[in-house]
Image (spheres, rainbow, N blue to C red):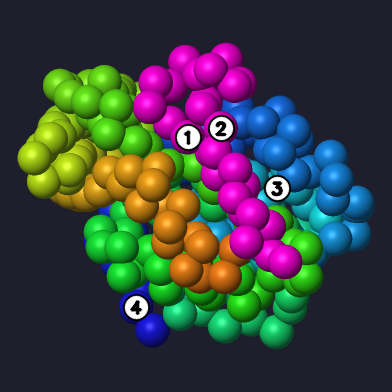
Amino acid sequence: MDHYTDYDDFAQVYNRHWGGFSIRILPILEQLALDNCPPGSAILDLCCGTGQLAKELAARDYKVTGVDGSEKMLRHARQNAPNAKFNCADARSFGLPTNFALVLSTYDSLNHLLTLEDLANVFRNVYRHLQFRGVFVFDMNLDAGFRSRWAGSLNIVADTSAVVVDAKYDEVEHLATMLLTIFTPVDEDNSLWRRSEVTLTQRAYSVDELNETLTSAGFAETEVFDARGDFAMRDEGRAFFRAIKR
């Protein structure tokens, strides 16, 4: 089983600065799936990160399981969502005893799968874990999203962390990279700080590639929604996918 230790140094700053994305898209998840998913249903939060979405789902009386490859991400998740269950596992190969009514994977988590073969393994694994007529909802950055949002630098400074972000996108290889230089204190009075570097890589897939891979995994019905056009999000080039197990 692969654990994504490269993401461990990112966990603290992700929890503070990026984990809230899932709360921002809750109204979209309601439209796509949650409104038709009664309380008490089993939901899988795949690539759950630091557990902010799992917290919101558990508060709505869903039976929530989170899966992520970074154990340090899951330490935050267990604190943020104590009523959910969490497993450290690879999205391509995890195995759980529960069949889920709904599987969610948010914040372009699946763009981190860098080959269609890996993505197909995730889709097949999700299909195996869904109940009949279960729903799979995820969002992805498309080419336009990387071209518009993965360029240049960004600095984030807070009392217990500082992050320098440098992002770029290779339009030929369809690969996006984000170098994060992270500074965090290592003592109680913040007099000594540790520097670490994390490189995140994502791949852009086309809508056709994603739909074909979903179909090959067994999903007979798929729909695609534009984040900006359908849901009035600011994010250009982000798409939401809904697939149903028949």
For image coordinates 34% across by 36% down, the residue present is 142
- Dividing the picture into quadrants, the one containing residue 189 is top left
Decide if residue 164 is in sight here: no
Labels 3 and 4 touching (C-beta < 8 A): no
Q: Earlier in the sequence, mark 1 or mark 3?
A: 3
Q: Earlier in the sequence, mark 4 or mark 2?
A: 4
Decide if residue 3 is in sight here: yes
Q: Which residues are magenta?
A: 220-246
Image location (x, y in percent) of residue 215:
51, 62
3D distance between C-alphas at marks 1 and 2: 6 Å
Q: Nearer the viewer, mark 3 or mark 4?
A: 4
For image coordinates 11% across by 46% down, the residue present is 173
In the figure, is residue 42 to the left or right of 203? right
Q: Where is mark 1, residue-wise?
A: 239
Q: Amino acid at mark 1?
A: Ala
For image coordinates 67% across by 31% down, the residue present is 28
Q: Earlier in the sequence, mark 4 or mark 1?
A: 4
Image location (x, y in percent) of residue 242:
62, 47
Q: Amino acid at mark 3?
A: Lys
Q: Is residue 232 magenta?
A: yes
Q: Where is mark 2, residue-wise?
A: 225
Indicate which disc residue 55 carries: 3
Q: Residues within 10 Å of mark 1 (few under 14, many from 20)?
A: many
In the figure, is residue 101 to the left or right of 23? right
Labels 1 and 2 touching (C-beta < 8 A): yes
Indicate which disc residue 2 carries: 4
3D distance between C-alphas at marks 3 and 4: 25 Å
Labels 1 and 3 touching (C-beta < 8 A): no
3D distance between C-alphas at marks 1 and 3: 24 Å
Q: Nearer the viewer, mark 4 or mark 1?
A: 1
Image location (x, y in percent) of residue 31:
74, 33
